[in-house]
Amino acid sequence: MLCSGAVRCQIFPSPESACRAIALEMKALVERRAAEGRMAVLGLATGRTPLPLYRELVRLHREEGLSFSNVVAFNLDEYFGLLPSHPRSYRTFMREHLFDHIDIRPENAHIPSGNLDPGDIGPHCRAYEALIEACGGIDLQILGIGRTGHIGFNEPGAGRGSRTSLVRLDHMTRTDAAGDFGGADRVPSHAITMGCGTILEARRIILMAWGAAKAGIVSEAFDNPVADEVPASYLQEHPDASVYLDKAAAADLRGHLCVEEKQHVLKD
Ligand code: F6R
């Protein structure tokens, strides 16, 4: 069950089966908090990776009555320089794939603003952090991983204690987003992102990765010692972090206990 680091890696036959398990955990959290009369605080990600998770959450809402009326959501990041209404903004992404299809209150769905005057960046980032704290901190943070090893948009070299801030995107990250923008040079050069320190304060973290393109960086992050050059590796130091993989993304993992888990899952 354990990789060579401390992170629990679980390998599933498909992204959909992994996302069913994650969605059930989210459902249990949201319903437990509702029974307690409290809000559930979710940290959410964008990109291709969480799409099957959001489809399953929408299905749970539509078909099984899961309510998000007691959910506060904080997204990890937003491209800098885009209006919220821009077709490629992460605000638009979240509306299209999740928020417009569930009953979360719009005022509870938080995403950093990418549309700020230079003088407003610092105050906006500090206010985002303060709001997370005022909501009691993040119960469950959902993450993808970039091929650079980024979590949020914390690129190689981002410190373990970094906070929400304006960051420069790595060339590889912009290349990976080129298809969405019609060319790498049209991808915004900067983003506002929660910091590594902000992310690591979540009480529980689930990082997801699918497909062969992520296999190398998954192994670098979780088979090797923690390194600033691979910010996702900081999850090894978190007391309750899990990595959910499909078989292709797990293919390069060397941690022997992971391999046992993989065989177990495949046998089933
Ligand atoms: C998105 C985010 C990024 C992505 C990562 C993987 O909010 O913070 O860290 O999770 O770039 O992107 P995809 O899922 O498109 O491969």
Image (tube, grey):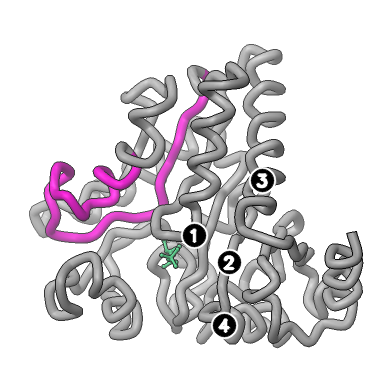
Label annotation for residue 49: 1
In magenta, the rendered stretch is: 70-94
Q: Which residue matches tag 4? A: 217
Residue at 55%, 78% (x, y): give it.
214
Q: Secondary structure at mark 2?
A: strand
**Does label 1 point to a residue whose CB lies under 8 Å from ligand 1?**
yes
Label annotation for residue 254: none
Q: Earlier in the sequence, mark 3 or mark 1?
A: 3
What is the distance, in whole Å, between disc 3 and disc 1 at their CAs? 13 Å
The quarter holding residue 241 reads bottom right
Reply above or below: 176 against 99: below
What is the distance, in whole Å, between disc 4 and disc 3 at their CAs? 22 Å
Q: Which residue matches tag 3? A: 22
Quadrant (top left/top right/bottom left/bottom right) for the N terminus: bottom right
Reply above or below: 252 against 21: below
**Residue type indicated by callout 1:** Thr
Q: Secondary structure at mark 3?
A: helix
**Residue type indicated by callout 4:** Ile
Q: Are marks 2 and 4 in contact (CB under 8 Å)?
A: yes
